[in-house]
Amino acid sequence: MLGFAESFLAWLGSTGISAILGLLLSLAFCKYFKPGYLLSFSIGVLFWVFVDIINDSGDLDVNASFSGGWEQIIIVFIFVAGVSAFFLLDRSVFSPEHEQSGSLTIPILIAVAIGVHGLGEGAAYANVAATTASNSLVVAFGGEAAGAAYILHKFLESMAVGVGYVVFAGKRESGAGAARDVGVLALAFILPSVAAAGAGYFVAYDSTYFFAIGTGGFLYALLRLAGPMFTTQRVSGSNGTLKMAAWLIGGLLCVYSAALLHSYLPGTFA
């Protein structure tokens, strides 16, 4: 069993620092690259993680066929409720009236939608920390490679939040205002993870249900970021669409590389 303070602070630090760095880097990139390309990169990242998250929810218990009972019904209901909640909060998913320069409404929704699967991650992490026989944080969670994989995942996910901030809030400049906004978005992104990691240490949760709502959140975020991706204001010309494909593949391969680290076992290539 690991101590609460040790495990919680490690989770808070790795999640929070990764989120802030990802947000800041995406703002820097948006000064030099067209938003359409960065949106494509973000879609690539989020699509891979969406597949990962729906797997963590047991594919919404699809293998149970029609015999899953109330557990299956609840998981599907939570997924539907998650998608519906974000769409209702957004009210008009692809409406240009919502894309008012300076508004944080949609960027915050995207941050929460991407970060909400942290309820499942945090609960699973805390449960391991509270029940492991190891007194080493690194050993308990699969070694340095697994830790690096988590940090890279959070970093890449938060980059997608930052791109959404630039596209929907129209912000590219640095300064006190941008720093405040980054803080707000980072908090919205990491709060579900941190809350679940704190509560999950003392009370065991079935993370499947949390991943179901996370699947709904990712579906909203994917559609919201895909909305402006092909508009003429973002990318134009036949070469532009090919470049968008390259950026999308790049996003997929980046998060794929992080997933390889998570699956890596020392001595595999010895």
Image (tube, helix red, strand yellow):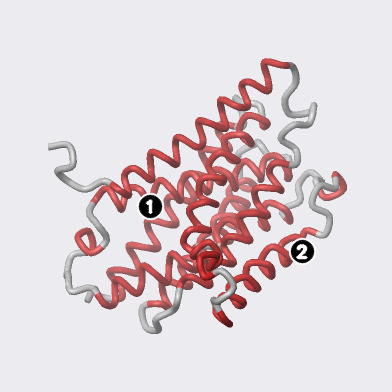
Q: What crowding class fits label 1: few (fewer than 14 Cα within 10 Å), some (14-19), or many (20 or more)? A: some
Tell me the residue at 37%/56% (across/down): 14
- Left or right of 257: which side holds 26? right
The image shows residue 122 at horizontal and vertical percentages of 43, 67
Q: What crowding class fits label 2: few (fewer than 14 Cα within 10 Å), some (14-19), or many (20 or more)? A: few
- Left or right of 166: which side holds 267? left
Tell me the residue at 17%/70% (across/down): 134
Between 9 and 155, the residue placed more toward the observer is: 155
Please name the amino acid that badge 2 sits on: Leu
Q: Farthest residue in the right direction?
A: 97
Give the quarter of the image for residue 202. Answer: bottom left
Q: Quadrant of the N terminus?
A: bottom left
Q: Is tag 2's residue or tag 1's residue first in the polypeptide sequence?
A: 2
What separation in Å lies between label 2 and label 1 (alpha carbons)? 29 Å
Which residue is label 1 attached to? 150
The image shows residue 195 at horizontal and vertical percentages of 48, 72
- Left or right of 194: which side holds 269? left
Between 135 and 208, the residue placed more toward the observer is: 208
Tell me the residue at 60%/77% (across/down): 74
Please name the amino acid that badge 1 sits on: Tyr
Which residue is label 2 attached to? 89
Residue 150's place in the image compared with 80, above or below, is above
Q: Quadrant of the C terminus?
A: top left
Give the quarter of the image for residue 170. Answer: top right
